Image (tube, helix red, strand yellow):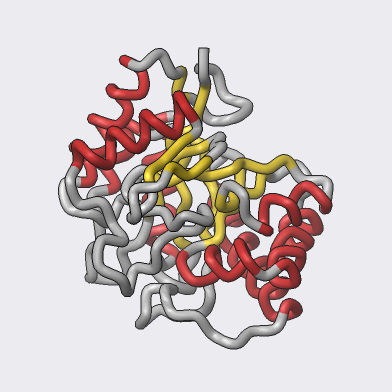
Amino acid sequence: MNRIDLNADLGESFGAWRMGDDAGVMPWITSANIACGFHAGDPSIMRATILLCVQHGVAIGAHTSLPDLQGFGRREMNIAPDEVYAQTLYQVGALHALVRAAGTQLHHVKPHGALYNMAARERGLADALARAVRDFDPTLILVGLAGGALVDAGRAAGLAVLREGFCDRRYQPDGSLTPRTRSGAVIEDIDGAVAQAVSIATRGEAVAGNGASVRVEADSLCVHGDRANAAAFAERTRRALESAGVRVAAPGRPA
């Protein structure tokens, strides 16, 4: 029987501004990537999201980003590997303090948005990110785009890695994600997104925007918590995976 992790990017509210439906998504996922204040989130939101994870038995990860609160971390910037290293440590350390105070443990690290895509293709940035995770705690799992440079960098650093696939993002023929600036980058139709999730989990395949089959060997699938009907999408994805005979569980956690 296939086994896969189901993750979501959560804790992306900030102050009085609210983003997503964390409470509705949380019962259906197995891992949460919590914003650490650089693209979204603040100490109170981070703590509340951690407590929600504890309540539902969801593995907790740090969702690190470029310092781009106004752009939600989705704007690329010219940044040196040493800066990525320091900023990753800063964000992971902040979340870890709140996780430890809640009496639980940090499970993984996943970069966000522009940083995620840059680290998938630029080995220097990927190596810096992997080194930061290793130097903070070599038992943490590093999450990166399936087939991308960050997965290779994590392995080279001696880390356990999770190759990530996306339920509701359209792929390019080379296995990269279609940039959000392009039309059709997000699969808005829930049926289509759920079908892609099942296809990746059971056959290791997605369909690119041009109709070509794309190989996606994933250990974890992402359901975005900031999309419309996020809770319903997460529930339908979880149920569809289980109906297809896939066990949904985070690494190191019982199915």
Instruction: Please provide percent x and percent y for residue 166.
Output: 41, 46
**Residue at the image point whose x is 65% and y is 49% from the top:** 142
* Above or below 33: residue 58: above
The one nearer the camera, 147 or 65, is 147
Residue 234 visible within the image: yes
Foreground of the two, 246 or 40: 246
Residue drawn where x is 47% and y is 50% of the image: 33
| Residue depicted at x 35% and y 16% | 244
16 sits to left or right of 254: left
The structure residue drawn at horizontal position 46% and vertical position 36%, both measured from the top left corner, is 205
User: Residue 95: x percent and y percent?
Assistant: 56, 57
The count of marks equals 0
> In the shown orientation, is residue 86 left or right of residue 187?
right
State whether residue 51 appears in this view.
no
Note whether 10 is above or below 91 in the view shown: above
Q: 14 or 162, which lies in front?
A: 162
Tell me where residue 171 appears, x and y as whole percent: 41, 53
Percent x, y of residue 55: 39, 33
Quarter of image, res 35: bottom left
| 225 up-or-down from 66: above or below | above
